[in-house]
Image: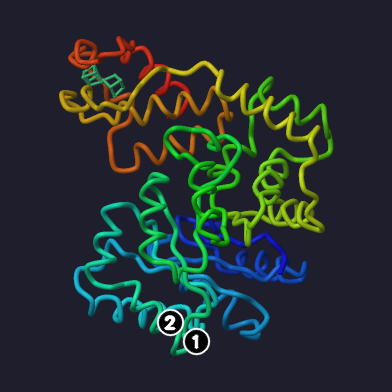
Amino acid sequence: MKQLGFGTMRLPTVNGEVDVKECEKLFDRFLEGGFTYFDTAYGYHDYKSELVVREALVKRHPRESFLLADKMPVWLVKESADLERLFSEQLEKTGAGYFDYYLLHALSEARIETADAVDAWGFVLKKKEEGLIKHVGFSFHDTPEVLDKVLSAHPQVEFVQLQINYADWESERVESRRCYEVARRHGKAVIIMEPVRGGSLADLRSPIGDPFKKAAPDKSFASWALRYAASLEGVLMVLSGMSAMEQVVDNMATFSPMVPLDEQERKVVEEVREALEKAPTIPCTRCNYCTETCPQGIPIPSILASLNDDAAYGEAYAKRQYASATKDKPFASACIECEVCLSRCPQHISITDHLKAAAEKFE
Ligand code: SF4
Ligand code: SF4
């Protein structure tokens, strides 16, 4: 099985709706390249990703020609009957008949409590016995300690899906390395999500990305990130949320065949990782003291994070982050300069100046 999986959380869109015809082209090209793994979830694309998978993939290709992963939205489960209802709905929406890989979605300590309370673990294992699931696992967003606890309590799980990329490998927030080590210590296969960190590592500002260009001028930044992830031992699949044909073609080339990073290339990645860490950033700790008092309800820490993204990853990615931060909230330009936030910020950040910069850059 080729190690690149097609994530369906960032499919191409037209006027806010998924472009099914374009998805057909992307999926067909992916299959023609000998790649078979597709990853969807109940909530992706406003609950429509599973329907798109049915139209663009399931209806148009023999079921045995692809592998499909889907996920139980544990946050929507209030009682055990919800598990059966949601699972049946997923089978119907995808039309897949069965799932090759099935995950309890985005487990954290609180969601593990829910999964335990309704015995979601017993439910997925029963579906496996019935042949409706081939392989059982979960995706995870919490600390290595919580991961260790849940894998000790549920040894039947076959694989774990983790956020792993070179930028987050040692980060205190994601703890990619330590989570990966816990999963491997428990003998679990690992599926990697966000290897290109939401696309941010595909678009690095100069001079941050220069070592990649110098080492391999014809290779994309994304190819370095994917190879970093796929070079790890025990990795079953590396998922990439692809939305354009160039990405599909470039990513497939990286895996045809996948060549693990050698020692020299690892040093190049390390150089870029260090440069990313040193990129000038606004030292916001996301304590939210400012947002508690802002009369305009401006999402200040998220806007400051977009400015930080702009410094490291370039404008295209930062603009997407800004759009997401202000999706249901006021823009930076809504600031009335009352300055209440300034006295609240323990980091003494010049919030009003940064908001002006964000408004100029992103709006
Ligand atoms: S200065 Fe702007 S961001 Fe700060 S509290 Fe006032 S309106 Fe909100
Ligand atoms: S108060 Fe300062 S550090 Fe805290 S979230 Fe607001 S800007 Fe960031």
Residue behind label 1 places its C-beta within 8 angstroms of ligand 2? no
Taking depth in this image into account, of 283 and 220 the one nearest to the observer is 283
Q: Residue at x 84, y 38 (%)?
A: 218
- Image vertical order of residue 6 relative to residue 92, above or below: above
Specify the amino acid type for callout 1: Gly
On the image, numbered disc 2 is attached to which residue? Answer: 91
Distance from the alpha carbon under mark 1 to that under mark 2 = 6 Å
Image quarter where the N terminus lies is bottom right
Question: Is label 2 in a helix, a strand or a loop?
Answer: helix
In the drawing, does residue 132 fall left or right of residue 272? Answer: left
Seen in the picture, residue 209 relative to 166 is either above or below; the reply is: above
Any mark on residue 97, and which? 1
Residue found 64% across the figure and 47% down from its top: 229
- Mark 1 and mark 2 residues within 8 Å of each other at the beta carbon: yes
The amino acid type, in three-letter code, at marker 2 is: Leu
Give coordinates of residue 341: x percent, y percent: 22, 17
Residues packed near mark 2 inside 10 Å, few (<14), some (14 to 19) or many (20 plus): some
Residue 125 or 17: which is nearer the viewer?
125
Q: Locate the C terminus by quadrant.
A: top left
Q: Residues within 10 Å of mark 1 (few under 14, many from 20)?
A: some
